[in-house]
Image (cartoon, helix red, strand yellow):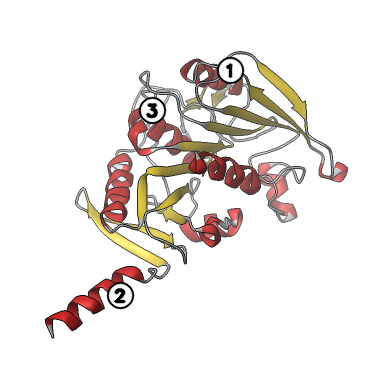
């Protein structure tokens, strides 16, 4: 009987886990995250996908349509408290806007999945949009040991976020030059129905900071082919040279506060601006992370 139980336990460990919502207790709260498991081996690389303000894991899955789990990756979609992340932003008077221990939650989540043998903690990659993008930057700034690479969409460096010097981190930024919420030139963040949502540095200041951190030289500008002239956008890639870790920035002229490549309803364009179809943020991020995971 003992041998039979041992064999059943080994078989259970060998079987891939099923996708679904999971819960852990952290800081006196029940925190949730959705996990999409690969069908392949355990100790896999993982991508943590952080929703924007007012978002949810299910909405983020629908917007991004990541397919890395089909290629042996773990996809993780955490849920912020009240659909927000405490990304370290401060208000105009220097007050902290949120107080949830989201950094501790993400650390505990990764530790839990690593202890189960689900993911390889040395190959965990972060991406996020808007508030989720700022949270990814906070991880880079304050917990760089958690992140093997990151992609930040429609967000600049928040003012007030503590960001001490740290090791170089592979990074992609995707910015909408006509973003109506997070200003490309820097300044206060604008959210409908909200008062003080803090401010951000300009996109150029943000990239200068991470170019210094990644020990980069000058950047080379590459024009992306305008496959969809009717979308009202043009895309430029700034590829930084001589970096200790890769750094790239996609600038979408005419682009708004949207996920490039995701076809939105017309009302979304009225609120958030245009969506570029000339690049797919999902494709660029998946290709970037996949290349890094092989190294």
* Disc 1 and disc 2 in contact, CB within 8 angstroms: no
Would residue 273 appear left or right of 290 to someone viewing this image? right
Label 3 packing within 10 angstroms: few (<14), some (14-19), many (20+): some
Disc marking residue 233: none
Occupied quadrant, residue 89: top left
Closer mark to the observer between disc 3 and disc 1: 1
Occupied quadrant, residue 281: top right
> Label 3 vs label 1: CA separation?
22 Å
Quickly name the residue at label 3.
141
Quickly name the residue at label 1.
242
Label 1 packing within 10 angstroms: few (<14), some (14-19), many (20+): few
Label 2 packing within 10 angstroms: few (<14), some (14-19), many (20+): few
Lower sequence index among marks 1 and 2: 2
Closer mark to the observer between disc 1 and disc 2: 2
Lower sequence index among marks 3 and 1: 3
Quickly name the residue at label 2.
11
Would residue 38 appear left or right of 104 to someone viewing this image? right
Nearer to the camera, 93 or 235? 235
Residue 61 at what x, y percent from top left? Answer: 54, 58
* Disc 3 and disc 1 in contact, CB within 8 angstroms: no
Occupied quadrant, residue 76: bottom left
| Disc 3 secondary structure class | helix
| Disc 1 secondary structure class | loop
């Amino acid at each position: 009987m003992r041998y039979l139980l041992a064999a059943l336990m080994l078989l259970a460990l060998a079987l891939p886990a099923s996708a679904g919502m999971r819960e852990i207790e952290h800081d006196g709260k029940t925190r949730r995250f959705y996990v999409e498991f690969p069908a392949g081996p355990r100790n896999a690389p993982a991508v943590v996908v952080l929703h924007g303000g007012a978002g949810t894991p299910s909405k983020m899955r629908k917007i991004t349509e990541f397919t890395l789990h089909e290629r042996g990756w773990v996809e993780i979609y955490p849920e912020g408290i009240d659909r927000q992340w405490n990304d370290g932003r401060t208000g105009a008077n220097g007050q902290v806007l949120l107080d949830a221990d989201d950094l501790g939650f993400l650390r505990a989540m990764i530790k839990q999945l690593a202890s189960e043998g689900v993911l390889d903690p040395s190959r965990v990659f972060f991406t996020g949009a808007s508030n989720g993008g700022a949270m990814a930057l906070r991880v880079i700034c304050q917990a760089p040991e958690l992140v093997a690479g990151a992609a930040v969409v429609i967000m600049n460096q928040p003012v007030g976020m503590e960001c001490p010097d740290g090791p170089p981190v592979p990074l992609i930024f995707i910015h909408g030059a006509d973003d109506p919420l997070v200003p490309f030139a820097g300044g206060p963040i604008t959210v409908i129905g909200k008062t003080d949502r803090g401010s951000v540095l300009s996109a150029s200041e943000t990239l200068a900071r991470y170019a210094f951190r990644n020990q980069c030289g000058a950047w080379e500008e590459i024009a992306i082919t305008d496959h969809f002239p009717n979308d009202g956008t043009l895309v430029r890639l700034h590829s930084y040279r001589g970096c200790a870790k890769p750094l790239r920035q996609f600038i979408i002229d005419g682009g708004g506060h949207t996920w490039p490549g995701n076809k939105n309803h017309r009302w979304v364009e009225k609120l958030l601006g245009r969506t570029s179809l000339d690049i797919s943020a999902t494709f660029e991020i998946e290709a970037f992370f996949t290349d890094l995971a092989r190294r």
